Image: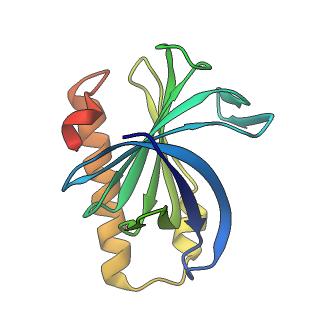
């Protein structure tokens, strides 16, 4: 399949804040798998350092309030971490994926430990009660997914 696609991250108000290119490698009725190479020199989140050249397998699901990035050391099979964004369900057009980030994130280490990030930013968002509940349910679903096994087969989500 491997089609070039643009990924657009938006804030909770729907304003684009960041975009980049990736390869759409799989599309099903449940979601999309995109491969993208990290393009920023260095970003540290807790004990994980994302480096330019790291491979991201990005899972976008049509009905879910999250996306999952499986981060590899460069383009190897070695998983550095999983970084999950809590967001409104993504939208897909033939050449782009867009999602509205709701600040809350889940970082999962290869040894199974996890951290919930940006709780204060999430609390400060101007979103309605239904969206807040759906976001928290999405977070709980992710925590359960990663507690089930150390290395979940994310392709099964598609």
Q: Residue at left 47%, top 25%?
A: 109
Q: Residue at left 57%, top 28%?
A: 55
Scheme of colours in the image: rainbow
Q: Is residue 57 left or right of residue 29?
A: right
In this view, 19 is above or below 34: below
Image coords of residue 65 (percent x, y): 34, 62
148, 100: nearer the viewer: 100
Q: Is residue 91 left or right of residue 64?
A: right
In this view, 98 is above or below 26: below
Quadrant (top left, top right, bottom left, bottom right) of the N terminus: top left
In this view, 16 is above or below 113: below
Quadrant (top left, top right, bottom left, bottom right) of the C terminus: top left
Number of callouts in the render?
0
Image coords of residue 66 (percent x, y): 38, 56
Q: Is residue 56 left or right of residue 129?
A: right
Name the outermost residue toward the right. Answer: 41
In this view, 75 is above or below 92: above
Where is residue 111, by image quadrant?
top left
Q: Residue at left 55%, top 77%?
A: 125
Image coords of residue 62 (percent x, y): 28, 62
20, 79: nearer the viewer: 20
72, 109: nearer the viewer: 72
Q: Residue at left 43%, top 40%?
A: 2
Image coords of residue 16 (percent x, y): 64, 72
Where is residue 19, by image quadrant?
bottom right
């Amino acid at each position: 399949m491997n089609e070039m696609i643009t990924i657009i991250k938006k804030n909770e108000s729907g304003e684009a804040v960041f975009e980049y290119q990736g390869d759409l490698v799989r599309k099903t009725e449940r979601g999309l798998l995109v491969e993208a190479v990290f393009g920023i020199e260095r970003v540290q989140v807790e004990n994980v350092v994302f480096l330019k050249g790291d491979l991201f397998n990005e899972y976008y699901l049509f009905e879910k309030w999250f996306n999952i990035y499986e981060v590899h050391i460069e383009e190897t099979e070695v998983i550095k971490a999983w970084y999950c964004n809590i967001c409104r369900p993504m939208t897909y057009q033939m050449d782009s994926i867009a999602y509205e980030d709701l600040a809350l994130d889940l970082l999962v280490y290869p040894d199974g430990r996890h951290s919930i990030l940006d709780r204060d930013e999430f609390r400060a968002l101007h979103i309605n009660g239904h969206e807040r509940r759906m976001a928290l349910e999405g977070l709980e679903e992710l925590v359960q997914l990663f507690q089930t096994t150390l290395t979940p087969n994310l392709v099964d989500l598609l």
